[in-house]
Image (cartoon, grey):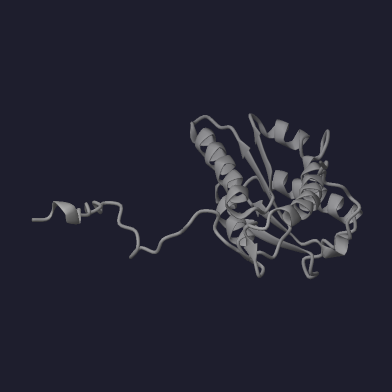
Amino acid sequence: MAVFEGNFTFNPQQLRFAIVIGRFNDLVTGKLLSGCQDCLKRHGIDVDPNGNQVDYAWVPGSFELPLVARQLAISGRYDAIICLGAIIRGQTPHFDYVASETAKGIAAIGFQTGIPVIFGVLTTDTMQQALERAGIKSNLGWQYGQDALEMAALMGQLRGLTPDYSQSDNKIVPALPVSSPGQLNPTAIPQQQSDPKNQS
């Protein structure tokens, strides 16, 4: 038997990342991005937007992160995707809906595509708490970058063990069968086949 663990003995030039950033609360997300870039750069990744290792996508807010992250994942171009956002509780239930759907959406992308997607979304009660986690006390952006490096290395090891892994010719194949609208009719009733022995 074997032990599989993401390590940092890989060739950094071979890795490709995408970072999706929510613009809402950019005072926080901008700091998370800086911390994430610092981590990747210190591990040999070229974080220049004009380079060929990291692509960046800005979205209006955290709720839009899963949609864009999934589109990037199914392209098959990236070893890992990092989602950065900040959701701060207000005086209405809006926080709960956005935080819940964002988390579920980001988690689903990994299941559907087999590409590691890092949940780098702060969910805090106050702006002060968010800022503390984005640079005042520590910058979790660094941790999100490190998580992406580790998962990219780990999945690179596991892909050789799973021949049916959902990548073929650099394209992602859906984990579940997909039917075209003309093939799927949820209201159709299966027709019972007649038994030739019972025919008169």
Quadrant containing the C terminus in the rendered view: bottom left
Q: Is residue 58 above or below residue 51?
A: above
Residue furthest out toward the left: 200
Q: Position of residue 4 (x, y in %)?
A: 81, 44
Viewer-side residue, 162 vs 47: 162
**At 79% across and 65% down in the image, what residue appears?**
53
Quadrant containing the N terminus is top right
Q: How many marks?
A: 0
Q: Quadrant of residue 173?
A: bottom right
Residue 143 percent coordinates (x, y):
80, 42
Task: State the residue at coordinates (74%, 58%).
Answer: 79
User: Horizontally, is 54 left or right of 102 in the view?
Assistant: right
Q: Position of residue 172 (x, y in %)?
A: 61, 62
2 sits to left or right of 42: left
Depth check: give the residue in front, 71 or 135.
71
Residue 168: quadrant of the picture = bottom right
For the question of whether residue 108 can be seen, the reply is yes
Q: Going by the image, does 67 lie left or right of 81?
A: left
Q: Position of residue 135 (x, y in %)?
A: 81, 39
Vertical order, 15 against 161 (above or below) = below
Decide: is 143 above or below 189: above
Residue at 52 percent of width and 29 percent of height? 91
- Residue 62 seen in render: no
